[in-house]
Image (spheres, grey):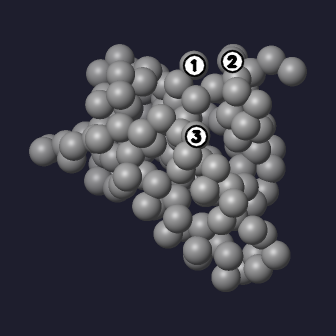
């Protein structure tokens, strides 16, 4: 199963745990594939750098390197019109559309209300775990 992972879920999984961590762990164990565009990966790195200012003991570089090598990469063109009320979220929709990925995992209310757009389902991390990840 392929998913597009919103930045908030990725960062929460690396720095905090809970369902976002379970998603990253499922990816690490080959249960799911993470689909990335350059724009999404750039945001992961930028937000991670911000978190590293507060959480100095976390080594995220190896995790980002692993993700860079093992994710499914797609060229996702910018959407010429806004889909989300938060234009920063359009990159996740664009990535899903370009890769024909039918699932975005996000806790962002701007993305959650778009569930169904272009045949893409948007689930919270907890809903995704409960529905798709078996222990």
Residue 99 % position (x, y) = 35, 28
Number of the label disc, if any, that sits on residue 70 = 3
Percent of width and height locating residue 116: 38, 21
Where residue 132 is drawn, which disc sits there? 2
In the displayed structure image, the side of residue 123 where residue 95 appears, left or right = left
The local crowd at label 2, few if under 14, some if 14 to 19, many if 20 or more residues have their Cα within 10 Å, is few
Residue 72 visible within the image: yes
- Could you tell me how far apart the alpha carbons at marks 2 and 1 are, in whole angstroms? 9 Å
Q: Residues within 10 Å of mark 1 (few under 14, many from 20)?
A: few
| Residue 117 image position (x, y, % from top left) | 32, 25
Outermost residue toward the front in this view = 69
Judging depth in this view, the residue of 122 and 70 nearest the camera is 70
Task: Point out the frontmost of discs 3 and 1.
Answer: 3
97 sits left or right of 43 in the view: left
> In the rendered image, which residue does mark 1 sit on?
1
Give the mark nearest the N terminus, 3 or 1.
Answer: 1
In this rendering, the answer to whether 97 lies above or below 36 is above
Helix, strand or loop for disc 3: helix
């Amino acid at each position: 199963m392929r998913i597009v992972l919103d930045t908030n879920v990725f960062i929460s999984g690396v720095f905090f745990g809970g369902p976002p961590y379970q998603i990253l762990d499922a990816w690490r164990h080959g249960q799911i594939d993470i689909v990335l565009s350059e724009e999404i990966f750039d945001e992961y790195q930028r937000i991670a750098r911000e978190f590293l200012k507060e959480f100095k003991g976390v080594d995220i570089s190896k995790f980002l390197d692993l993700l860079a090598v093992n994710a499914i990469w797609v060229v996702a063109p910018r959407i010429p019109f806004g889909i989300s009320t938060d234009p920063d979220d359009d990159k996740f929709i664009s990535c899903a559309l370009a890769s024909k990925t039918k699932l975005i995992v996000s806790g962002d209310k701007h993305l959650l209300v778009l569930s169904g757009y272009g045949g893409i389902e948007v689930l919270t991390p907890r809903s995704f775990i409960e529905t798709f990840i078996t222990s």
